[in-house]
Each structure stands twice: as structure tokens, then as C-alpha cells.
Amino acid sequence: MKAMTTAQKNHSMALDNYRARVNGCLATHLSQSSALSENMRYSVLAGGKRFRPILTYTTASVFGVDLTQADSCACAVELIHIYSLIHDDLPAMDDDDMRHNQPANHTRFGVGQAILSGDALQALAFDVLTKNDSIDPETRVILVRQLSRAAFAMAEGQSIDLSIVSKNVEIDLLYSMHRKKTGALLQCAVMLGALLKPDLSSEDKVILSSFSADIGLAYQVQDDVLDVSTSDAVLGKRQNSDADKDKPTFPSILGMKESKKVYRSLYEKACEGVLQLSMDEAPLIELTQKLLSRTF
Amino acid sequence: MKAMTTAQKNHSMALDNYRARVNGCLATHLSQSSALSENMRYSVLAGGKRFRPILTYTTASVFGVDLTQADSCACAVELIHIYSLIHDDLPAMDDDDMRHNQPANHTRFGVGQAILSGDALQALAFDVLTKNDSIDPETRVILVRQLSRAAFAMAEGQSIDLSIVSKNVEIDLLYSMHRKKTGALLQCAVMLGALLKPDLSSEDKVILSSFSADIGLAYQVQDDVLDVSTSDAVLGKRQNSDADKDKPTFPSILGMKESKKVYRSLYEKACEGVLQLSMDEAPLIELTQKLLSRTF
């Protein structure tokens, strides 16, 4: 194993800091006692890679945005992500009984309460996103619009996913489904971090939009591949669950080798495009390389 | 039957106009074709009393607010309401197969797609609420905060409702559950209409907050009573469904006579309190009287 360079070590420490930071903020937002607080805390504080908040913080830092402003965006995106996992795991959806190495929310609390936990987390995301008074109201409105549209696209993507089980589909539909189901929220995670900079240029916006769309799509194709090649314990959920459910995936349509090519070239394209940014893009490239080499 | 006075006729026409107005706006917001558009339109455009949008428009008109500003608030509140009905009707929740005189969303589209329709409608509500550029950003942020907190409380209320099936509970818990489950969104419907007036006085805000909390609670107690005393066809859903599910309700704890007293006195208290408003409160009182005499 190669020793890490100083830059790599610093980058790795930054990611750990971001993860700790968002965990602390999420715990604060869930500290109030309520009918659903135990259920929500169970899923939100169970761990997870916190990849979306890390994207938000990294982009914010690239644009010199104060991280206290990015906190609410990072939390809101993660709350939407966790709600979607709770609902996706339900028996009527993907029917997964394990998540983050613990029983899924509905296995622990029952289907009805799991649905409501997800519903409440979606509402909480918009509350958290708007209550940060350090962000000017114009920007907060833009953030809510971005997040609401991403959350809408995510539900649409999951709807397509559910409708194509046991069906032969064209690869284009799979691209379009993945862009909505996973890509939209990942893209949103990047864009929220950037939109906190009030005078963000339209050029940088376009570059980031393309960068985040590429890594969002790459991430889901890679997920399909990892679902086949990685063990339960490492994934924190059941391996091969896509195949067991007869879901069309990139590996099932294109094969493993071709699917790996697809996500690798998307990550590469993302790295090339982001070089045009007016800011120092190094942290975004390092993060993308980290993603490329992830094993879960 | 007594003939209607001119004032009553005008009021009745105003309500019909509000209902038509929100129906038109909702149809526009759902006109884009998407994976879930058929499912969402099925439930959103199925009719319904549109009581929450009517409350928003009536309050906005009392404060002299342009109704084009109120449109997005009226729609957003109704979208949250409809999403909650779709989720409440699910087998793991209240397990109701009829809604608005047609099969419930999950009966028509399956449980998974019904959950996703509800999820997408919640996201859409926040999108609709923020995209009305005729409302200044400061106000839009306040509206999002109100709606997100009401939606959160609603999920909490439904969670309590689900947890007390077949249990003996104190009447105080029922009050608290109803305030969250139904009251919070009704209160929000009133407050959104008023908050569109930029210089709303804190006195008027307090008066309206109390008025809307009273009618919100009265409405749900009355619902409990109507569930026992009204036929399926008039309700648009199954009669006596609370008793069939062994749910504690106001009639099951206090009896019908006492329950009627409770909601009547709440409506009366609402009407008395709103007399202190700095504006002409007549439309709000007429609406409350209409509610008191509703049969479904």
C-alpha cells in the first residue's frame, strides 16, 4: 500500500471533519423530543457515508463560503437522502430489511411509523434549510427551490425504478432513471454549496452543474456494480439485492466490464470539466478520485 | 328552508370562486408530464372540499392581499393535505380503500407508487410555495417555515394516532393529537393568507393564530362526530371507519352529545376572538358558521 501524500492526508482529514460536523448538526436538529424523534434519530444518526453533505461542504469551501452557512444545506440534503432510504426500504418498494448494518426503520418500528418518519424528515429538511438566518432570504428561496425540485425528481426516479422491475428496458431509460433517482440530489448537494456564494458567476454555475450531474450518474452506476461485487458487511445492506429483485441494472444490461467503463469515464469527464472553474478545483477533483476508488 | 340573505349568497359565491380558482391553479402545477403525474392528478384533482385553500383565500381577502399572491399558498397547503390523505389511507396506516368517492390512490396504483405520489406532492408543495415571484423573498422564507413546521406536526399527529389504536387514552392526548394531525395545517392555511400582508401587526397575528387553532381543533372533533353520523356516499369514504379500527375518538371517550358541545363551543370561541381583529372579520365569521353547519 502506498503511503499517503501530505495533500491526500489533509484531504482525508477535511472529509472526516465534514462528516463530524454534519453529524453534530443533525443531532442538534433532532434533539427536540417528539412523537417521531426516536424513529428519526434511529435512521439519521445510524451513520452512513455522509457523501452528500461532504459534497456540499467541499463545494462551499472551494467558493470561500463560511461553513456555518453551509451547515443547514448539508443537513437538509442528508435529511432528504435518509427519508428516501427509509421509504425505499419499505416492503412495497425495495423490501430491504437491513440498512447501515442495522434493521431497516420499518423492521424496527413498523411500516406505518417508518412512512411517517420519512414524511417528517422531508418536512424537517425544508425547516432546517430556511431557519439559517445567516443566509440572506433571496438565497434561501433559491436553495428551497433547488432542494424541492431535486426531492421531486428523486421520487419520480424511484417511481420509474419500481415500474421496471422484471422488465426489459433500454439503457437510455436506466440513464434517465438514475439521473433522477440518485443524480438529482447529488447534483443539488453540490449546487447548494456553490449557491451560497452570492455573486456566483453563470459560467461557474454551468460548470458545476455539469460536474455534479456527471458524478451523480457515475455514483449510481457504480452502486449497481458494487451491489454485485461487494459483501453484505461492507455494504451495510444485502449484496446482490438488485438481481434478487430482478431489477434491470447497468451490469445486467451492459455487463460488469462495460458498466465499470461507464462510471469511470463519467468521473473522468467530471474531473476534466471542473478544471475550467474560476476557483481552485483541487478539493473537488480529490473528492471525485476518492469516489472512483470507493468500495461501498 | 330559509331563503339566503344577499350577504350569505355573496359569501357562498365567494367560496365557489375560491374553489374554482385553486382547482385551476392545481391543474396548472400538475400539467407537466412526469413519471408520477397520472397518480398525482388522480388524487389532487379528485375534488374534495378545498377547505384549506378557502381559508387561505378568505384570510388573504380580509387583509386586502392580491389573490394572485395567495394562489401559491392555497395550492401548497392543499398539496400537503392531499399527500397526507394518500399516506393516511395506506394499508399500514388507516387502511381505507375509498377516498372522495373513488378508490384510494394505493388501491388504484399500488402501495409503492402511492407512497411516492405523496412524497412527490410534499416536495411539489415547497416548489410551488417558493416560485411565486410576486411575493418578496423575506415573506417566502416565512411561508416555507410555517408550512414545513405544519407538515412536520401533521406527521407527528398521525404517528400518535397510529400508536393509540385499541388503547385507552386520556382526552388530553386526543386534544394534543388532533391539534397536530389536523389543527396545524388548518392553522397554517389561515396564517399563510395573513402573512402575505407585509406589515401584519403582531396583535392581528396573535388573534388569527388563536382563531385558527380553535377552528382547526373544532374541525377534527366534528370529523370524529360526522364519521359516526354520516353515510358513506356523503362522506366520500367509509362511515364509522374510526370505530371499525378501534380508534379512540371524541365520541368514543366523551359521547356524541358532549363531543358536539366541544366543537360548537370551539367554533363559538373562534368567532368571539376574531372580533378583535383590526380588519373586517365578517368573511371569517361567515366561514366559521358554514363549517359549524357542515354535514361532511
Image (cartoon, coloured by chain):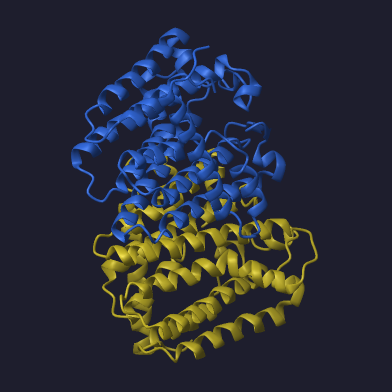
Chain colours: A blue, B yellow
In the drawing, does residue A112 fall left or right of residue B147? right
Across and down, in percent, residue B293 comes to: 53, 80
Q: Residue at x 39, y 66 (%)?
A: B142
Q: Quadrant of residue B154?
A: bottom right
Q: Residue at x 59, y 66 (%)?
A: B180
> Which residue occupies the foreground of this view, B3 or B107?
B107
Q: In this orientation, does residue A168 appear? A: yes
Across and down, in percent, residue B17 comes to: 32, 71
In the drawing, does residue A288 fall left or right of residue A226? left
Q: Quadrant of residue B241?
A: bottom right
> Which residue occupies the foreground of this view, A31 or B150?
A31
Q: Residue at x 65, y 60 (%)?
A: A33
Across and down, in percent, residue B75 comes to: 38, 60
User: Is A270 situated above or below B36?
Assistant: above
In the drawing, does residue A244 fall left or right of residue B45? right
Q: Residue at x 49, y 48 (%)?
A: B118
User: Is A196 situated above or below B35?
Assistant: below
Residue extending farthest right: B168
